[in-house]
Image: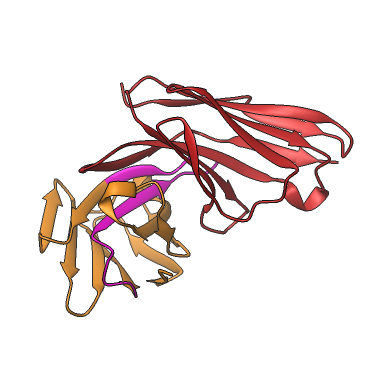
Amino acid sequence: GENVEQHPSTLSVQEGDSAVIKCTYSDSASNYFPWYKQELGKGPQLIIDIRSNVGEKKDQRIAVTLNKTAKHFSLHITETQPEDSAVYFCAASISTNAGKSTFGDGTTLTVKP
Amino acid sequence: DTEVTQTPKHLVMGMTNKKSLKCEQHMGHRAMYWYKQKAKKPPELMFVYSYEKLSINESVPSRFSPECPNSSLLNLHLHALQPEDSALYLCASSQGGSAAEAFFGQGTRLTVV
């Protein structure tokens, strides 16, 4: 089955700095890679996703890159703000059954004001 | 409307009790999921329903019994649970097909005493 590794497990940055979270996956059949933000006491919220036919996707301060050959994908957050503080999960799945995702172990991001 | 609604938000039950968790979505999604999330861990898939039929059971103990009464509703019936079953139970839904995005509810925080 699929295995997703996520690094780092914790990340602390100063407000305004950039944050980068990296994931690797094992199953070459995976073609859909969502990123979720989970705030304390809430469910995961989809913040950005990328499909295997695209190398990069950007949405305002958030961008995701994908290297299919190396089976790597990364989340980039620029100009971080305190409200970006949360746990971030990467995931990998096959797009026709995206809810059956394999998650990384999560990264706790703290943005210091 | 991209909302998945779960009730109750919190539940405390004894090991001999029977209770049910409910999940509702009105996005017309054809796939619905139950996940279990322990503290500081990623969500773990329990069940997948596709077109109201159970398609995946990830070897979940029989004390957890899912039910999909219609395309908008998903229930999880609980009976004779153990304290180690205490966790955040998350419901998610997705359109299926090429529309891959999965949306999560806020979860039910379950405590078994």
Figure colour of chain A: orange
Q: Is residue B86 left or right of residue B101?
A: right
Which residue lies at the image location 52% right of the left edge and 44% below the top edge? A40
A36 drawn magenta: yes
- The picture quadrant where one finds residue B25 is top left
| Quarter of the N terminus of chain A within the rendering | bottom left
Identify which residue, B68 or B37, lies in the foreground.
B68
From the rendered image, report the letter of the chain displayed in red.
Answer: B
Q: Is residue A54 left or right of residue B89?
A: left
Which residue lies at the image location 32% right of the left edge and 23% below the top edge? B28
In the image, residue A67 sits, relative to residue A16, either above or below, namely below
Return the x and y of residue B40 as percentages of the image width and height: 58, 58
Identify which residue, B85 or A63, lies in the foreground.
B85
Q: Is residue A39 left or right of residue A51?
A: right
Which residue lies at the image location 32% right of the left edge and 72% below the top edge? A27
> What stretch of residues is rendered in magenta?
A26-47
Snapshot colouring: by chain
| Residue B30, visible in the rendered structure | yes
Which residue lies at the image location 67% right of the left edge and 37% below the top edge? B65
B43 drawn magenta: no
